[in-house]
């Protein structure tokens, strides 16, 4: 009924990597409700977050004016009431706040050199904001200490994909499952974390597709699975090598494909000899016959796809896990055709785009290495500047360590919340408290903003113009439905205003000008123009002509690697960084849940979502709860070597008897107080999915 709204605005959901297209229905300059729109990744479908997750925009905690820390503020700590920040901060004009922010960063640059500054952007940034943010750090401070939450997400997957396939993005959209006979979903829980993508997976099983689900937790998709492999936590490499062992042993490899498009298969084949499913059974807890059945189903399928999530990536052996998945696809030739391919399900709506735009310490836009002189020259010419550091910068967790070591003294944090999202978060909070100058740009007094010296009030996604890129490589146009409240401003404007105060000659007047500049250094955007996106809403990259909507499947005829060949990189079994022992006998794993988004700053301020899932919780097997003498709904204390939290217990038969699962959105029982900061050596991603813990009745 068009009478119940004044106007509608087409945009994109700001939450998960599915990137559903939405239609804001606006009445009296407020979002009255949200409908699904016919985007290629959602075809009008939405999940509960896309439907009900928008009223945070008008929450009373919203920051309306810039804030500067008061001279008489209490010592920095997690101690600011978000409904009354004026106990710690005073209101300031934009002029004063921007001058103050730039002066603090500029002073450190002068006294300590640009390397004393680091920047955290966010996957909530548009492509244009992400591009400007990394450019500000590189051009303004002449080094590469810029990162964002991709480091906590798929950094290890991207490391493996870049190494072995030559490109970090998915090789096929998730919609290609419609053309598949078999799909392997491993270490992912799409029903909660990519709910609209999960609807395509369910449709696939309805028409007879064989779904193999592999996860240490019995995630929701198990109800649709032909095979459910609930393997031991951390045993991914053992399981995947055993599957590949069977494929080689039974002669199910695609020899023609291997010969035409790959290298190093002989080494992989030799390596797999030691991984029979019988030998791996005690490690991964899956009967050898079941492993054999899965191997046969995958290898003999006409077309098969592989999907994975944080359960694969967030380990100290995350890169090895992905190497195995890549090898599995290559040895069976299940890549480069319709209904085949590798698809790491991206977590956040623009983690793909923010990474493509270069907001990572080792790569410039389009994953071009910072150490490559030719690449640096290209950007020096686009940015009209002299050289900057060829060394890769520090990553998210390394930056926190560098603050403790006194090497990083100032930070600019846009939309990221490391005081909740970093592993061993008390270590991260202490680091933020040590900074001499912290500039935070956000919508609310987030946990990170508690430690700020100056806070710049940002705009919500529904108030912005910009493009974002979803898990499917689909670049989509976001349009503003509302104007920012109070004195809050669009983020790209704030970045430009800060940059000019730091001495950079930036003159952008609209995000379209930023996009045009990005195209000069990013071949992935060939044939994709701002005008085209305004007209068509979405174009998938690569797009081969101005008329081509983009390629759903890539690498049909070789890979962007030497001689066009993808590589097999054998992976050894590595133990988790800490294993259970008598003192800490259980395994802690963390993640998201359907109703809440990451650190909860938006969804816990959305009325319906908060009502549906109002409380911090931990899931344990009912037998484990009985042994603890705790009834479901009772309180438990969970401890690791990093800290302890008290949280309400839920009974969940899907969780193994020696495991605990905690969502990380709740500050009152912050999961990351407990998590292990040990890093994967390649992707530098922390081991969120495995910590040794102790659980007691609280
Ligand atoms: Fe938004 Fe993801 Fe839900 Fe789609 S599936 S509505 S993108 S949270």
Image: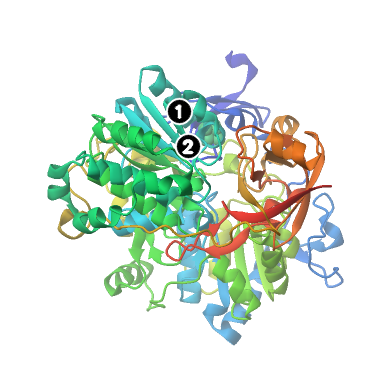
Pick the front one: 646 or 409 = 646
Residue 42's disc is 1
Q: Which disc is residue 112 wearing?
A: none
Q: Is mark 2 within 8 Å of ligand 1?
A: yes
Q: In which quarter of the image is residue 54?
A: top right
Task: Choose the circle earlier in sequence order: 1 or 2.
Answer: 2
The answer to whether marks 1 and 2 mark residues whose Cβ atoms lie closer than 8 Å is: yes
- Horizontal side of 447 relative to 173 (left or right) equals right
How was the colour assigned to the protein in this rendering?
A: rainbow
Residue drawn at point x = 22 percent, y = 51 percent: 559
The x, y position of residue 689, in whole percent, is 56, 51
The correct choice, above or below, for 260 with respect to 7 in the image is below
Picture quadrant where residue 659 is located: top right
Tell me the CA gap for discs 1 and 2: 8 Å
* Left or right, 136 with reference to 461: left
- Tell me the residue that label 2 is attached to: 19
Q: In the structure shown, which secondary structural element does the residue marked by tag 1 occupy?
A: loop
| Residue 287 vertical placement versus 264 (above, below) | above
Q: Position of residue 621 (x, y in %)?
A: 67, 36
Q: Residue at x 35, y 57 (%)?
A: 571
How packed mark 1 is, by other alpha carbons closer than 10 Å (few <14, some 14-19, many 20 or more), is: many
Q: From where the camera sits, is residue 625 visible?
A: yes
- Seen from the viewer's position, the closer of residues 241 and 687 is 241
């Amino acid at each position: 009924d068009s009478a119940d709204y004044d106007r509608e605005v087409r945009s994109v959901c700001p939450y998960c990597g599915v990137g559903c297209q939405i239609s804001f229905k606006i009445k009296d300059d407020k979002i009255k409700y949200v409908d699904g729109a016919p985007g290629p990744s959602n075809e009008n479908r939405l999940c509960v977050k896309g439907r009900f997750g928008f009223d945070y925009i008008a929450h009373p905690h919203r920051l309306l004016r810039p804030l500067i820390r008061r001279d008489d503020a209490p010592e920095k700590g997690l101690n600011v009431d978000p409904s009354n920040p004026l106990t710690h901060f005073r209101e300031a004009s934009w002029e004063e706040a921007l001058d103050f922010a730039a002066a603090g960063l500029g002073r450190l640059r002068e006294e300590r050199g640009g390397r004393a500054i680091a920047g955290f952007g966010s996957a909530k940034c548009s492509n244009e904001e992400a591009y400007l943010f990394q450019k500000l750090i590189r051009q303004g401070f002449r080094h590469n200490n810029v990162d964002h939450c991709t480091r906590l997400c798929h950094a290890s997957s991207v490391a493996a994909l870049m190494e072995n396939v030559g490109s970090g993005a998915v090789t096929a959209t998730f919609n290609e499952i419609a053309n598949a006979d078999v799909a392997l979903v491993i270490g992912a829980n799409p029903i909660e974390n990519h709910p609209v993508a999960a609807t395509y997976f369910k449709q696939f099983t309805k028409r007879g597709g064989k779904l193999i689900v592999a996860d240490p937790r019995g995630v929701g998709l198990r109800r649709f699975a032909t095979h459910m492999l609930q393997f031991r936590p951390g045993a991914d490499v053992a399981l995947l090598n055993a599957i590949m062992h069977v494929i080689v042993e039974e002669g199910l490899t695609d020899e023609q494909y291997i010969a035409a498009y790959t290298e190093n298969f002989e080494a992989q084949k030799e390596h797999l000899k030691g991984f029979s499913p019988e030998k791996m059974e005690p490690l991964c807890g899956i009967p050898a016959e079941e492993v054999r059945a899965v191997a046969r189903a995958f290898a003999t399928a006409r077309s098969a796809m592989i999907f994975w999530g944080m359960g694969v990536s967030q380990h100290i052996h995350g890169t090895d896990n992905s190497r195995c998945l890549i090898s599995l696809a290559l040895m069976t030739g299940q890549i480069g055709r319709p209904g085949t391919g590798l698809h790491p399900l991206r977590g956040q709506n623009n983690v793909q785009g923010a990474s493509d735009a270069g907001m990572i310490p080792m790569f410039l836009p389009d994953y071009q290495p910072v150490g490559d002189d030719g690449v640096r020259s290209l950007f020096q010419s686009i940015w009209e500047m002299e050289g900057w550091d060829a060394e890769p910068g520090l990553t998210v967790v390394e930056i926190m360590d560098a603050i403790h070591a006194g090497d990083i003294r100032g930070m600019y944090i846009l939309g990221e919340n490391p005081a909740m999202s970093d592993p061993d978060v008390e270590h991260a909070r202490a680091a933020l408290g040590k900074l001499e100058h912290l500039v935070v740009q956000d919508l609310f007094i987030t946990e990170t903003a508690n430690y700020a010296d100056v806070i710049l009030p940002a705009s919500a996604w529904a108030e912005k113009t910009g493009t974002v890129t979803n898990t499917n490589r689909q670049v989509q146009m976001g349009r503003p439905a509302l104007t920012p409240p109070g004195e809050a401003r669009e983020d790209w404007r704030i970045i430009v205003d800060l940059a000019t105060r730091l001495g950079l000659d930036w003159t952008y007047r609209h995000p379209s000008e930023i996009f045009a500049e990005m195209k000069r250094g990013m071949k992935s955007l060939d044939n994709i123009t701002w005008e085209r996106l305004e007209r068509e809403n979405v174009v998938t990259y690569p797009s081969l002509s101005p008329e081509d909507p983009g390629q759903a499947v890539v690498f049909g005829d070789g890979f962007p690697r030497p001689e066009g060949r993808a590589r097999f990189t054998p992976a050894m079994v590595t133990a988790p960084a800490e294993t259970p022992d008598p003192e800490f006998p259980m395994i802690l794993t963390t993640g998201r849940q359907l109703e809440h988004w990451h650190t909860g700053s938006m969804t816990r301020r959305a009325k319906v979502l908060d009502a549906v899932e109002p409380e911090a919780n931990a899931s344990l097997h009912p037998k484990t709860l009985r042994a603890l003498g705790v009834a479901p709904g009772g309180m438990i204390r969970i401890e690791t070597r990093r800290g302890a939290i008290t949280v309400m217990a839920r009974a969940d038969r899907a969780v193994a008897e020696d495991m605990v699962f905690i969502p990380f959105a709740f500050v009152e029982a912050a999961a990351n107080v407990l998590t292990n900061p040990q890093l994967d050596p390649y992707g530098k991603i922390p081991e969120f999915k495995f910590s040794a813990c102790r659980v007691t009745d609280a």
